Image (cartoon, grey):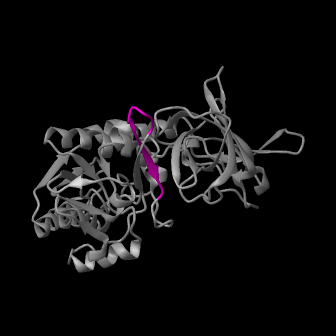
Amino acid sequence: MEKTLACGAKEYRFESCRAHRMKLKKGTRILVAMSGGIDSSVAAALLKRAGFDVIGAFMRFWSEEIEGKKTRCCSPEAEKRAKKVASILKIPFYVFNFEKEFKKRIVNYFLKGYKEGITPNPCVVCNKEIKFGLFLEKALKINADFVATGHYAKKRSKVKNQRSKIIYELLKAKDAKRDQSYFLWMLNQQQLKKILFPLGDYTEEEVRNLAKKFKLPVLDIPKSTEICFIKTTINNFLEKYLKENPGKIVCTLPDNKQKIIGRHRGLWFYTIGQRKGIGLPSGPYYVLDKDLKKNLLVVTKNEKDLYKKELICKNVNWISGKKPKLPLKVKAKIRYRHSPALSIITYNGKSKVYNVKFARPQRAITPGQSIVFYKGKELLGGGIIS
């Protein structure tokens, strides 16, 4: 797709950069995070084709050791594919071993969250701490100007004031179905300044066509949808590292009293809104709440009980680096596949948390998950549901 690349006498620009008014000189050094999958491979190929000084790098992450079980990403097979793609593109290739840091910062965070009764999102933290944290540090040490990934997202820069201060904005990708901006809300201005998203203006179909055109051996790889460091299931993983902690299952009655109707294996094996796997007869039942102090799993037969019109969030990050004027109307997503919902954000100065009120009740608001705020196509920021 030659039309997606524009070149002048002294500079090269690729399509997603053109939309962001970002001009990159030929020879700009870019370190590309290569997972061995189709997206990162095509991202590297586009940058190489545009005339940049491209370096590929694979990140080794920690994963549970189970003989005969493999993770689709971050595996030795994925590393071999990434190396092969780098060879085809004729670019240098590095391997960064982040196993120790990944275990400490991501896996332990994941386990700690479940133990505390919440449902954490490790991918969001990984993007901040590893992919655009440690990886960016490595890039700067080898004098790279930017890092690039296969994320479907966009970046735009604009002059904020008369002093010519540049502010970087994070935007949704062209392909709404593949947009991954939700997972990037923890990024800051210092990180965004050094990040490129080559696939931001491409659809998934266009990326597949490019992979064919560039003859990259990545077309038959299944998509990875599970958590990368877990080789079995989340419950099997939790059972191995947190064990079981049985307790009572209670159902709230119309008079607000609670009736004991069964036993649970441990609160960390359940998440808000869950219907399957509760193990109760005469269902269906839905997980409504978790009482950590009493070790109670609260369920309901009425699915309408799951709908709430308000939530509290903490650890809020604003992409611009500055809290906007509140109250603020936004579209908010309470999980990745959730449709953005009209809402109003306010700030509670005493408790230092943000309140989010929705125009319509939202199903299964889950503590530990990310809530992300959008204004049109721009991602303003996000926080952790409390």
Of 239 and 332, nearer the camera is 332
Of 61 and 166, nearer the camera is 166
Placement of 243 over or under 218, stated as above or below: above
Q: Is residue 9 left or right of residue 126?
A: left
Q: In this view, does 294 lie to the left or right of 300?
A: left
Placement of 18 over or under 294, stated as above or below: below
Q: Give the range drawn in magenta.
A: 160-172
Q: Residue 228 appears in which quarter of the rendering? A: bottom left
**Residue 278 included in the magenta stretch of the image:** no
Placement of 70 over or under 164, stated as above or below: below
On the image, the x and y values in percent for residue 351 come to 64, 22
Tell me, yes or no, if residue 68 can be seen here: no
User: Residue placed at 24% from the left, 47% from the top?
Assistant: 146
**Residue 161 included in the magenta stretch of the image:** yes
User: Residue placed at 26% from the left, 72% from the top?
Assistant: 218
Of 28 and 308, nearer the camera is 28
Q: Is residue 328 left or right of residue 199?
A: right
On the image, the x and y values in percent for residue 93 come to 12, 56
Q: Residue 227 appears in which quarter of the rendering? A: bottom left
